[in-house]
Image: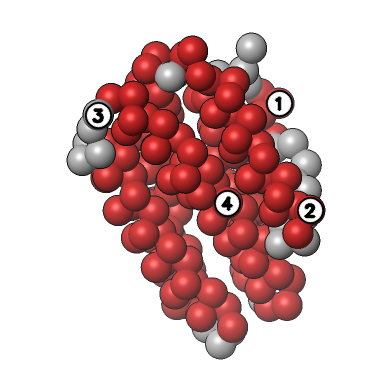
Amino acid sequence: MTTISHYLSGDHGRCDDLFAECEMHAARQKWTEAVASCARFGALLERHFQMEEAVLFQAFELATGNASGPTRVMRLEHEQMRNMLASMRAALESRHADNFFGCADTLNTLMQQHNMKEENILYPMADNVLRPRAQEIIQAMTALQAADVASGSERAEPQSKHETAA
């Protein structure tokens, strides 16, 4: 049985892989490829945020009766990452490597710190509190992913190299 932690941590790995691909293209000054990779990364990251905000966080808040705790902090951090991603995209569009890498470094730091909090604190709490509903919650998050792929807003992503190590 898959846990919420395992499911969402695997998604973190897929996001990390696409982020690295975007950086690689930018480092090689392959701007068209970098923009395309960044768009795929942005779509995947936004879908991840939606799975958390629309499904996991709501279920967690309902179960705990607390909407001002860790989920509030995670939402605020999601917004910071969205803003940094927008700056990163703008730098790519203008082919300004220094700005891009400055934004990318900041976003990478934000993501790594955020993911550590989720993977070490929030997800284990969610696994514990939401255990009876875990499969239902995972199915709801999977449905969001399937809807994105079906609508063409995101291509189906292969399994992350991070997942194969788990």
**What residue is shown at x 39% (from left), y 14% (from top)?**
128
Quarter of image, res 107:
bottom left
Q: Is residue 150 above or below residue 140?
A: below
Of labels 1 and 2, the one closer to you: 2
Residue underneath mark 4: 47
Residue underneath mark 3: 65
Residue underneath mark 2: 150
Depth order, front residue of 130/24: 130
**What residue is shown at x 51% (from left), y 49% (from top)?**
50
Q: CA distance from mark 3 to mark 4?
A: 25 Å
Q: Is residue 152 above or below residue 8?
A: below
For marks 1 and 2, the one nearer the N-term is 2
Q: Looking at the image, do the residues carrying marks 3 and 1 touch, with CB atoms under 8 Å apart?
A: no
For marks 2 and 3, the one nearer the N-term is 3
Decide: few, some or many residues near mark 2? Use Cα within 10 Å; few <14, some 14-19, many ≥20: few
Which image quarter is the C terminus in? top right
Left or right: where 154 falls relative to 44 = right
Of labels 2 and 3, the one closer to you: 3
